[in-house]
Amino acid sequence: MTDVIEMHLKLLFDLDNLIADMEEPAYKKIGFKIEDEASLELIRKRNQLLKKLPEELGQIYEILKRRYRQAIAPVESEFCLGCFQKLPTELATRSKEIITCPNCGRILYWRKK
Amino acid sequence: MNLASLLSKDRVSLSLKPGKKDSVIKDLVYAIKKGTDAELIVSTLLKREELGSTGIGKGIAIPHCRSLAVEKLEIAVGRTSKPINFNSIDKKPTSLIFLIIAPPQDPGNQYLITLGKIVQIAKEITKKNLIQKAKTPEEFITLINDIEKGLTKRK
Ligand SMILES: [Zn+2]
């Protein structure tokens, strides 16, 4: 995965969480003003980002998003934060490849130290 | 969890350089993260601003988002030395900015609870005209703590 693709993927994920929050009743209750037209524009923007990903990655992302709402799970001390299972040690080194959790299938993300 | 405990004095800047909304947001994010993590957070925050300004009026703004780039709730506070244009809902200039970044996974909904609390505290600050009150970051955190205690007592 190149740095550019990784950045697209991370931004796509952040924007999807943003869209999910906008629809969250507890968020709406706080009372920030949201413009409807801008919400539609945000969805267009995330769809454009999705198209910028390699096709297979985009498909995996969408399937995982439908299944889990959040397609990416950060890794923390060798645990997948999606399913809270310990990852095999051979996985736990940061790699340029897309790695999915052997247990839940989410795309794993190692945070920068 | 009380808000004051989430604030640290090195993340409170009471003489933030005034400028365009985007650059002020960027300066606050860089107090929390650097490099591509900071870039990601700034992009997401600016997308959030496009949905509608988080400038809630009367001089206060509360930019916020979740981001893959943080592992826990992070808050930075800035007060610009001169009021800036934040496209606030009341169209008035802004000088006090609470910036909140939450991790995507958030057990217990700490993010939305904290965000709601900051909005409440911000309203107290404007009501009592306290934006310029604190002279040091320590004083600012004490002020937030006092306001928060007052709010809890009232309930
Ligand atoms: Zn997993």
Image: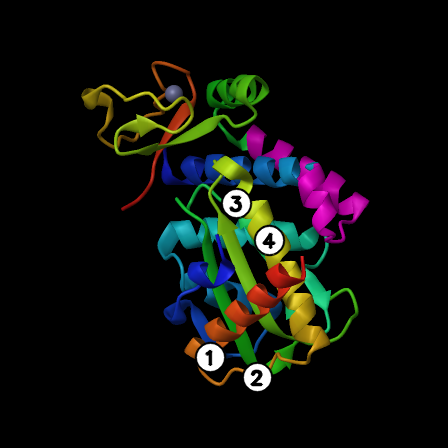
Q: Quadrant of residue A63?
A: top right
- Is residue A29 placed above or below A85 in the rendered structure? below
Q: Is the CB atom of the residue marked by disc 1 within 8 angstroms of ligand 1's nearest atom?
A: no
What residue is shown at x 41% (from left), y 24% (from top)?
A: A107
Marks 4/3 in contact by CB < 8 Å: the verdict is: no
What residue is shown at x 73% (from left), y 42% (from top)?
A: A39
Foreground residue among B99 and A99: B99
Which segment is the magenta one? Answer: A25-51
Chain of residue at mark 4: B
Which numbered marker is on residue B133?
Answer: 2
Which numbered marker is on residue B110?
Answer: 3
Marks 1/2 in contact by CB < 8 Å: the verdict is: yes
Amino acid marked by disc 1: Glu
Foreground residue among A7 and B10: B10
Give the CA separation, mark 2 to mark 3: 28 Å
Give the CA separation, mark 3 to mark 1: 25 Å
- Is residue A8 placed above or below A59 in the rendered structure? below
